[in-house]
Amino acid sequence: MVVKKQTVPAKAAPPAKAAKGRVLLRKPLVKAGPAPKSRAEVMAGFTALNERQARARRNGATESNLKMRAHLWPDLDEKRLWLRTDKTRKGFTTMPRTMALIINLIDDISKQATGGKAVPAGRTYLVLWCRVFDEGFVKIDNEAVAALEAGYAGERNVTTWRQHLAVLRDLGFIDCKDGPAGPYQYILLFNPYQVIKALNAKGMIQQGTYTALFQRAIDVRATDLTEA
């Protein structure tokens, strides 16, 4: 015969008592949630998301372009192309995609900085962008060579080069400091969009020209002209 043992239920622990006989209620433990994000953290999250979306768009556009290129030129040897993504290629710079329009705009408004004299300084501006690195600073040690790049030859090539730099400075596109190699040895390039926006506010740019630049800037997702 098997005798079953009776189990005695465990007694509940008595509530904790205060020193003066008062009963203290035990509070349930609440797991703390994540701390609210700061505004800076939220904005950083949005920035990271926008960057990921932009990379996805670029990757999609690249894939589409490669497919179309392969369709139109099926036998193309890529070695015949100059590709920035080719790590063996050196000597490139970064510039706004609207540079062609900016150069034409500079040529159009140069007369307003010279009292009516035609000084098409657009090519000079292009030379500066072809020489600049990502810090926005250019050093010209040989003005004759730079003038030749801009298409100025002959005895007055350096004089022409300096005249065009003076126009760019007076319009606000650059600032210059003198050095051992000449009065325009050190050059600082300002954001061309900001300069053009200021010139447009002064009424110095034809609206058709500004509208064309504005539209192209939107197409390439440049926000400089719409920033406050």
Image (tube, rainbow, N blue to C red):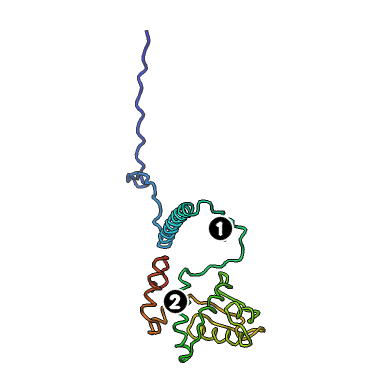
Query: Which type of secondary structure does the marked residue at label 2 adopt?
Result: helix
Q: Where is residue 183 in the image (x, y as percent from the top left)?
A: 61, 86
Quadrant of residue 43 in the image? bottom left
The Cα atoms of the two marked residues, 1 and 2, are separated by 30 Å
Q: Which amino acid does label 1 sit on?
A: Thr
Report the residue marked by disc 2: 194
Q: Residues within 10 Å of mark 2 (few under 14, many from 20)?
A: some
Nearest-to-viewer mark from 1 and 2: 1
- Which image quarter is the C terminus in? bottom left
In the rendered view, tell whether residue 1 sits above or below residue 225: above
Q: Position of residue 92 (x, y in %)?
A: 58, 66
Query: Which type of secondary structure does the marked residue at label 1 adopt?
Result: loop
Q: Which amino acid does label 2 sit on?
A: Gln
From the viewer's perspective, tell me whether residue 27 is left or right of residue 104.
left
x 42%, y 82%: residue: 199
Q: Nearer the viewer, residue 23 or 159?
A: 159
In the rendered image, the residue lying farthest to the bottom is 115
x 39%, y 77%: residue: 209
Q: Where is residue 114 in the image (x, y as percent from the top left)?
A: 48, 90
From the viewer's perspective, tell me whether residue 2 is left or right of residue 93.
left
Mark 1 near mark 2, Cβ–Cβ under 8 Å? no
Report the residue marked by disc 1: 85
Q: Nearer the viewer, residue 160 or 192?
A: 160
Quadrant of residue 156 in the image? bottom right
From the viewer's perspective, tell me whether residue 66 is left or right of residue 145.
left
x 40%, y 69%: residue: 216
In the rendered view, tell whether residue 21 sits above or below residue 53: above
